[in-house]
């Protein structure tokens, strides 16, 4: 930091007055109670704040100090609401009306047992309560898993901050910041804590979240006298606000709940998580089905009570319990919880593939993405720049070597550079090395870059030309900077010239077209020659030519200013005029190896990849062609987009897949245009100004490595590796998750349909089935109430969950995207659900009839044996149906049947069924009797019909569709 800046900071005359609204954490931070230390940091000079916080602006806190302060002040977090105690979460499982009804039914059953004493224990009541308990535990576990996943999600997207600790720059989780830490802020960062600025390079901060002021505020370091509102504390930056321009260094004054954001955190935290469209749809379907099933149950109870000859208190109770059990079993009350669990599981899987989901809804939307609009640099390319060539007035110099290793010679046509060319190149690289914020680091022969890779490559080039960056810093002390922004596409720095004190030097680098517009001369040898129109055209032609070689090209220029200009600090872009053009530097940024394949995969999946870049149109088009994004080499520029009315742009986006030299506003227009064309758009972004486009896109994708905190917070998904291929992998996962949700929906709905239809027709057809004849009390039900509950438990449990983790279909990326707006349950799915339900009902009732005297088919069994047979058949139907549920079209035998969870769940369910049939106390509770091997075989044979018949119906469907073409 410039010491002079600190000297400017004025002391506050009202220093012994403590404003009521001022945060005074520094008082705590230094453990001092002196009057001085209680003054708000914005009212004090930088030195005073630093002294009060016992920190050093250059080296920051030591690790030990930071650790001590962390244990003293706690994590820099907005404390979450008090967690709900576990017992409450468990108790919440019993809130459902149907569960309450079931508990009442258990009580009534127990009371009737007390009255009649017809068994040793109230088995039925015990069974109902046990089932309610198991259901509640399952619900609780599922919810806990969903919550854990959500917490993991939050952990994955934690914010980071750049700090200086022990003299070293480091990137740490923002939660670990403490008062006294020195933080570095630059464009696109979210401010991680309240802090007092000690250095500002044109820093502008958007504080809308705190002050409601939508326009970014310019920040400086001067102390402010007197008490002022938050919005006017221009030397402070506040937790949760965002840097929109420039850079700064600040000392943390308040963290976590002590920050200004902490004061309003209660308000912020109350916003509940929005349900995803899928959750909303399922909630709706669940309610609809619930109402339908309850209506059916009521009708059935009424039918039995009024039409059948129901005599005695016990018989009435039986019928009521039966009705409640049916309603409980058939209402898919657990759907939203299971969906959340599956979505969250999917999110974890995606995280393993380096795609971090920030909003659950994105998982669903990803599956229907029809366009992936991606940046070029770093996403489709490696963002590992190597300068290859420098072109000045005198000619072209080539650089040898690869990567950031600064060893490599310069050559001209394979030989040495002439003196003039050497001097021109050297001056061009001096400019490139000075207007530069990157740092080259040598890890024992392995060289890396801290900062922007483009700038890193320029530093490497400067070294290859024999220039030493440290020497440059000494010769040209930096006085100011006009930071790079993707709108301006330029960056300038102003320096004092150690050799000629009477002048300042401005070095500018940036996109050649933008730069040339600000140049009036060109340096030729040692002199500056006025730029003619012809020469400008020549330079642009060289620029195009280099871009055509897939090079990223930057121009460099300089100018001198009289020393007196330093009085006009901070410098503004007025200094970027009348520049002297120095040359062009072309660097390669090779395409990512995996990007080409990912582009092909996306295309195969009916998704159109689009490149939107700030780079030159030719560079963009060449790389796009290399990657297979476009064949025609056509690229539309931001300037062209500006001239297009919306309807023309709509037509353009239908055909053109490469957009170059675009600003963030153009990105926004492109997204909107694609959406008007009916596309579902996944769009990447990294810069702070990309946030609106990311928010507008159906799936906003931020870069985890090079992206700014602001874009990450605006995004639905963050790429941990900035890689295009990761987006495609995430789309695949999104599709797989959606297809799994459909699988278990198909399964649950058809299973429930089977149960409801069996009961409904069983009651309706008591006469035909022989049930009437078998019953002594006049009313005999196809299944006992506890049996229905059992089936619900078995089917809603393991098999449904196992389907939720089925591996994706191998052909999932060969299908077109799911149409936007298509519900999760399609018409074809409903047809399948009714078909399977009907088969189950017919089969189960057939077995029931077969096992009873009378009815359509004469049998010999007791009512208890017949019910056990029907019960086992219905359970086995559910187990066979697991395999049907994989698809509405594909055969259950095609593709991989290799989900061990499904087989495990089926085996486990069969084991439980055997337990219910053979264990004496369970026999009592579930009114079952032991079955013979022949009985089991019969049940299995009938139950397997659902598999064969569904296979046949799928085959007919496939043939019919093939015929339709
Ligand atoms: P993408 O949008 O695909 O990430 P990009 O990185 O090229 O592409 P920008 O960062 O907006 O997009 O850069 C636009 C142009 O600005 C570049 O083509 C280059 O000419 C120039 N440029 C890039 N980085 C710098 C920099 N650090 N200093 C000066 N000019 C730069």
Image (spheres, grey):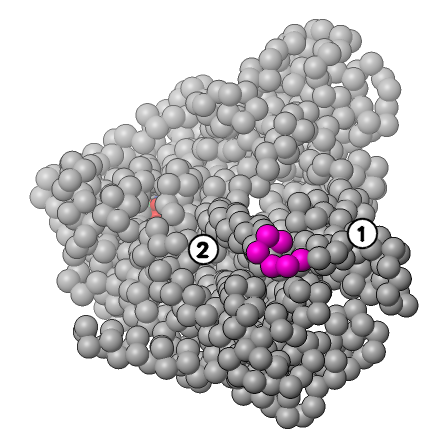
Residue at the (81%, 47%) spot, across then down? 87
Q: Which mark is residue 118?
A: none
Q: CA distance from mark 2 to mark 1?
A: 43 Å
Provide residue 951's location: percent of width, then percent of height. 40, 81
Tag 2 residue: 364
Which residue bears the numbered disc 1? 107
| Residue lying at 50% horizontally and 51% vertically, measured from the top left | 292
Callout 1 secondary element:
helix
The foreground one among 547 and 863 is 863
- Residue bounds of the magenta highlight: 305-310
Residue 502 spot, x, y in % from top left? 41, 27
Residue count near mark 2 (Cα–Cα under 10 Å), binned few <14, some 14–19, many ≥20: many
Residue 673 position, x and y percent, is 24, 43
554 magenta-colored: no
Q: How many marks?
A: 2
The secondary structure type at the circle numbered 2 is helix
Q: Quadrant of residue 120?
A: bottom right
Q: Quadrant of the C terminus?
A: bottom left
Q: Tell me if residue 511 comes above or below residue 382 in the rendering.
A: above
Is the CB of the residue bearing disc 1 within 8 angstroms of ligand 1? no
Q: Position of residue 873 (x, y in %)?
A: 59, 79
With respect to residue 418, does 258 lie above or below? above
User: Where 626 falls versus 197 (above or below)?
Assistant: below
Q: Nearer the viewer, residue 648 or 685?
A: 648
Disc 2 versus disc 1: nearer the observer? 1
In this view, 239 is above or below 781: above
- Tell me if I can see residue 301 in this picture: no
Q: In the rendered structure, which disc, 2 or 1, sits on the residue that comes first in sequence?
A: 1
Residue at x-position 84% and y-position 53%: 111
């Amino acid at each position: 930091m410039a010491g002079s800046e600190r000297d400017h900071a004025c002391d506050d005359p009202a220093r012994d007055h403590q404003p009521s609204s001022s945060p005074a954490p520094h008082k705590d931070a230094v453990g001092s109670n002196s009057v001085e230390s209680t003054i708000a940091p914005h009212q004090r000079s930088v030195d005073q704040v630093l002294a009060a916080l016992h920190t050093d602006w250059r080296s920051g806190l030591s690790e030990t100090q930071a650790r001590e302060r962390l244990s003293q002040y706690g994590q820099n977090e907005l404390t979450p609401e008090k967690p709900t105690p576990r017992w409450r979460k468990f108790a919440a499982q019993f809130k459902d009306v149907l569960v309450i009804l079931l508990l009442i039914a258990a009580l009534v059953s127990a009371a009737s047992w007390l009255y009649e004493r017809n068994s040793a224990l109230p088995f039925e009541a015990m069974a109902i309560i046990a089932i309610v308990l198991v259901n509640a535990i399952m619900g609780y576990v599922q919810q806990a898993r969903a919550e854990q996943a959500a917490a993991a999600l939050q952990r994955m997207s934690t914010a980071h901050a750049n700090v200086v600790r022990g003299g070293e720059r480091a990137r740490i989780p923002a939660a670990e910041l403490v008062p006294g830490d020195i933080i570095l802020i630059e464009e696109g960062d979210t401010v991680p804590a309240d802090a007092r600025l000690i250095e500002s390079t044109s820093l502008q901060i958007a504080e809308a979240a705190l002050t409601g002021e939508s326009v970014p505020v310019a920040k400086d370091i001067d102390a402010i006298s007197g008490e002022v509102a938050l919005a006017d504390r221009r030397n402070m930056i506040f937790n949760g606000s965002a840097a929109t321009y420039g850079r700064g260094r600040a000392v943390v004054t308040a963290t976590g709940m002590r920050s200004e954001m902490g004061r309003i955190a209660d308000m912020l935290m109350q916003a509940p998580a929005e349900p995803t469209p899928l959750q909303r749809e399922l909630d709706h379907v669940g309610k609809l089905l619930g109402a339908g099933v309850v209506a059916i149950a009521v009708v059935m109870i009424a039918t039995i009570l009024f039409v059948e000859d129901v005599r005695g208190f016990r018989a009435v109770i039986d019928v009521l319990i039966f009705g409640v059990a049916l309603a409980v079993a058939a209402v898919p009350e657990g759907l939203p919880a299971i969906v959340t669990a599956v979505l969250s599981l999917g999110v974890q899987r995606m995280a393993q593939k380096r795609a971090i989901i920030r909003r659950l809804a994105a998982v669903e939307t990803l599956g229907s993405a029809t366009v992936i609009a991606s940046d070029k640099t770093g996403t489709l390319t490696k963002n590992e720049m190597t300068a290859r060539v420098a072109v000045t007035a005198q000619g072209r110099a080539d650089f040898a070597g690869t990567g950031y290793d600064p060893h490599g010679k310069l050559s001209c046509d394979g030989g040495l550079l002439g003196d003039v060319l050497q001097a021109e190149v050297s001056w061009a690289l001096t400019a490139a090395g000075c207007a530069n914020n990157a740092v080259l680091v040598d890890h024992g022969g392995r060289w890396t870059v801290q900062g922007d890779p483009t700038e890193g490559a320029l530093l490497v080039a400067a070294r290859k030309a024999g220039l030493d960056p440290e020497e440059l810093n000494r010769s040209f002390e930096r006085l100011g900077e006009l930071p790079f922004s993707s709108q301006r596409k330029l960056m300038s720095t102003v320096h004092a010239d150690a050799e000629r004190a009477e002048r300042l030097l401005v070095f500018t680098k940036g996109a050649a077209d933008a730069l040339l517009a600000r140049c009036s001369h060109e340096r030729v040898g040692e002199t500056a020659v006025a730029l003619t129109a012809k020469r400008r055209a020549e330079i642009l032609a060289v620029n195009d030519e280099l871009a055509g070689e897939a090079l990223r090209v930057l121009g460099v220029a300089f100018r001198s200013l009289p020393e007196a200009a330093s009085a006009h600090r901070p410098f503004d872009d007025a200094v970027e005029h009348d520049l002297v053009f120095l040359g062009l530097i072309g660097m390669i940024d090779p395409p990512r190896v995996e990007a080409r394949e990912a582009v092909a995969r996306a295309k195969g999946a009916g998704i159109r990849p689009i490149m939107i870049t700030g780079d030159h149109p030719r560079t963009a088009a060449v790389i796009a062609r290399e990657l297979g994004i476009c064949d025609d080499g056509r690229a539309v520029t931001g300037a062209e987009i500006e001239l297009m009315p919306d309807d023309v742009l709509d037509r353009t986006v239908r055909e053109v897949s490469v957009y170059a030299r675009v600003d963030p506003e153009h990105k926004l227009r492109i997204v909107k245009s694609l959406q008007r064309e009916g596309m579902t758009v996944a769009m990447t972004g990294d810069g702070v100004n990309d946030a609106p486009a990311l928010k507008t896109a159906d799936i906003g994708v931020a870069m985890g490595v090079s992206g700014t905190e602001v874009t990450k917070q605006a995004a639905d998904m963050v790429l941990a590796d900035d890689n295009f291929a990761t987006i495609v992998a995430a789309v695949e996962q999104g599709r797989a998750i959606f297809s799994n949700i459909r699988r278990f929906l198909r399964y649950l709905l058809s299973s429930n349909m089977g149960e409801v239809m069996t009961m409904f027709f069983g009651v309706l057809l008591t006469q035909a089935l022989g049930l009437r004849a078998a019953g002594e009390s006049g009313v005999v039900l196809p299944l006992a109430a506890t049996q229905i509950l059992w089936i619900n438990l078995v089917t809603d449990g393991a098999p449904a969950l196992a389907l939720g983790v089925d591996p994706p279909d191998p052909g999932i990326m060969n299908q077109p995207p799911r149409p936007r707006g298509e519900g999760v349950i399609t018409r074809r799915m409903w047809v399948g659900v009714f078909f399977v339900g009907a088969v189950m009902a017919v089969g189960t009732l057939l077995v029931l009839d077969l096992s009873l005297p009378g009815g359509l088919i004469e049998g010999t069994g007791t009512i208890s044996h017949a019910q056990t047979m029907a019960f086992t058949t219905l359970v086995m139907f559910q187990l066979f149906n697991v395999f049907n549920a994989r698809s509405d079209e594909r055969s259950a035998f095609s593709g991989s049947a290799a989900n061990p969870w499904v087989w495990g769940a089926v085996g486990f369910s069969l084991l439980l069924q055997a337990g219910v049939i053979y264990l004496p106390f369970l026999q009592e509770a579930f009114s079952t009797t032991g079955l013979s091997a022949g009985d089991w075989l019969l049940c299995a044979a009938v139950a397997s019909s659902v598999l064969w018949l569904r296979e046949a119906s799928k085959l007919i469907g496939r043939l019919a569709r093939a015929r339709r073409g």
